[in-house]
Image: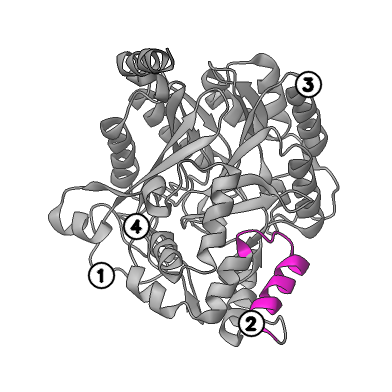
Amino acid sequence: MQDESWFKVCAILLLYPTCAHAHEGFFWHITDHHYDPTYWSEMRSCSDEVPVRGIYGDYWCDSPWRLVNNSINAMVSIKDDVDFILWTGDNIGHVDDQYASETYVLNILRRITDALKTAFPRVKVYSTMGNNDWYPSDQLPGTTHFLYNATAELWEDWIGDGNQLETFRKGAYYTVKTAYGLRIIGLNTNIYYTSDKLTAEMTDPTGQFAWLEEVLKNAKAAGEKVLMTAHVPPGIHVPGKVKRFYTHYNIRFLDIIRTYSDIIVGMFFGHDHYDGFKLLQRNDGRPGVPMFMAPSITPWRYKIPEKSGDPHNPAIRLVKYNQKTGVPLDIHQYYMDLTASNRNNASDWKLEYKASEAYGQSDLSAVSVDNIIKSFRTDKYLLDKYIRYISVLANEETAVNACDEKCRAELNCGFIHMTEDSFDSCYTAIVGGSARLCSSSFLIVMLVSVYMYYGLL
């Protein structure tokens, strides 16, 4: 009798093999287009001399339109039947404010918005603004503004809710539910960014913190799961130990996320331009919420007197997830080899990696990301793989060889330590002695901070 029951179960499973994949869906995560309309003329975004301009751009420059449009076409070609798209901002090139205006910003936002609507006419795009999607750059205000209103009109069809459009007009944040009941929260974290001088002394610019807590409270009461998306991530950026948020905003933001870590299953950011992830731990040290930073479409690298950013290839990201619970299941990272594509006068978007295969986990839940991060501490080969992915295979061997013990300590601490004090304690425990970063890294921090102050990062 027992054997007969087992046979029936096996037969059912064979007849319905797709049951194991029930509720699996996909969404695109794209970020940091940084379109430069002057690439073929004044080259205003380029941070170094470019003797020969490639048709898809250059590592020293922001994206020409051919790269922006080609990346969207590649998304359609790879997978057009996605549930939605996360678009996490920074669409304006790194150009001096003297060459920009509110109209300039709005025209670029409109052009990329129209291109996405044409390519994905039946797909919702959940968009958030970046620190460069503004004039003057970085200076997003803590009150309503023309650009908040104008951007709300551009994205009205995607948001699709009158009340949430009004919320967006207050400060570029909103919430919607997917067709499967998953809650998406789109935030404006640019107002917490250390380059925003208008909000430095505020406590809750645009009222976003109070609104966020109310939305999360209601979501928990309704039994909903939440995906959060924004441009600038919290925590400590490494290597270099750069703080993205003002300290008081970083603390409050992380406290809110920890409070609702039982319903927030993933956070998705841009801004870094490089590939990366982190894990926000709960107060008791258990895995809390995974954070994923997608690499940029622009190949632009910064250059300051004593330091240049590493080259990196244009990238687009496809995420597999559970449509009901929102839990990220896998990342399919695609990229364009910029050098080869320019040389061949033809784009070639390739699969760089699948996270499940690269890191040996069945999903990308908080527990699984915690497993990966723990493995990095003892498995040099696995961390080397992560370092190669940071630059989207543009600088892989150089980056691995250049990342010494102190660099690796910064990486390992940065995965889970989101405040300066916590990060320093971790770093000291690994390298011993003073928690001061190595002299070169310290110099980088100072130079990058100056660069950020003047709105160039």
Q: Secondary structure at mark 1?
A: loop
Q: Label 1: which residue? A: 51
Q: Quadrant of residue 213?
A: top right
Q: Nearer the viewer, mark 4 or mark 1?
A: 4
- The residues bearing labels 1 and 3 have C-alpha atoms spaced at a distance of 59 Å
Q: Residues within 10 Å of mark 1 (few under 14, many from 20)?
A: few
Among all residues in the image, which is located at the extreme front? 1
Q: Nearer the viewer, mark 2 or mark 1?
A: 2
Task: Name the N-terminal-most of marks 1 and 3.
Answer: 1
In terms of depth relative to the viewer, which is nearer, 326 or 124? 326
Task: Name the N-terminal-most of marks 4 and 3.
Answer: 3
Range covered by the magenta-colored residues = 414-432
Q: Secondary structure at mark 4?
A: loop
Q: Label 3: which residue? A: 221
Determine whether label 2 and label 3 are within 8 Å by CB: no
Left of 12 or right of it: where is 132?
right
